[in-house]
Image (cartoon, rainbow, N blue to C red):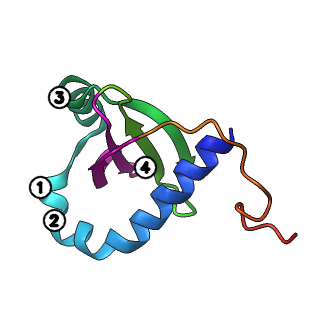
């Protein structure tokens, strides 16, 4: 659960940083969700690691592969259009406990 919160937090940060770029390139980086998920699985071996709902009713998902080390963050609109927000390498699953300070809670 704490890993999912961390992954979602990283995903939200990436979305905020790349929102302008995503809008400009949405035609090349978006498609129907089923096709996007299938391509991530077939090409990179990625599966969904976490999911969250943004305040604008968009679904944010983090896909990753421990085997290939790749990761992808997607955003899906209520109409079913899925866009790639960010992607990279070096994915690693963490099994550490986060402290309240790491979660942003006052100590």
Would you name the residue on which mark 1 appears?
28
Q: Which-is-in-front pick, marks 4 and 2?
A: 2
Give the residue displayed 58% in from the left and 63% down from the top. 55
Q: Are marks 2 and 1 in contact (CB under 8 Å)?
A: yes
Point out the stretch of residues depicted in magenta. 68-91
Q: Earlier in the sequence, mark 2 or mark 3?
A: 2
- Are the residues at dot 3 and dot 1 in contact (C-beta closer than 8 Å)? no
Q: Earlier along the polypeptide chain: callout 4 or callout 2?
A: 2
Q: CA distance from mark 2 to mark 3?
A: 21 Å
Q: Position of residue 10 (x, y in %)?
A: 49, 58
Q: Position of residue 28 (x, y in %)?
A: 11, 55
Report, in whole angstroms, how far the alpha carbon at label 1 lies from the one at label 4: 19 Å
| Mark 1, secondary structure of its residue | helix
> What's the distance in space between the residues labelled 4 and 2, CA to CA?
19 Å
Given this view, does label 4 or label 3 mark the residue nearer the observer?
3
Lower position in the chain sequence, tag 3 or tag 1: 1
Badge 3: few (under 14), some or many (20 or more) residues near its Cα, within 10 Å? few
In the foreground, 29 or 81 = 29
Give the residue pinned by disc 3.
43
Q: Which residue is mark 4?
A: 78
Placement of 65 over or under 27, stated as above or below: above
Q: Farthest residue toward the right?
A: 107
**Classed neighbour count for the residue bearing mark 1: other residues with Cα under 10 Å, few (<14), some (14–19), many (≥20):** few
- Up the image or down, 21 lies above or below 83; here it is below
């Amino acid at each position: 659960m704490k890993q999912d919160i961390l992954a979602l937090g990283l995903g939200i940060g990436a979305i905020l940083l790349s929102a302008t770029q995503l809008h400009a390139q949405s035609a090349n980086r978006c498609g129907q969700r089923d096709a996007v998920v299938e391509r991530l699985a077939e090409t990179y071996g990625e599966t969904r690691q976490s999911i969250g709902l943004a305040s604008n009713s968009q679904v944010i998902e983090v896909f990753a592969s421990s085997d290939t080390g790749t990761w992808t963050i997607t955003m899906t609109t209520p109409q079913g259009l899925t866009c790639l927000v960010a992607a990279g390498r070096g994915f690693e699953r963490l099994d550490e406990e986060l402290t309240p300070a790491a979660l942003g809670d006052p100590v």
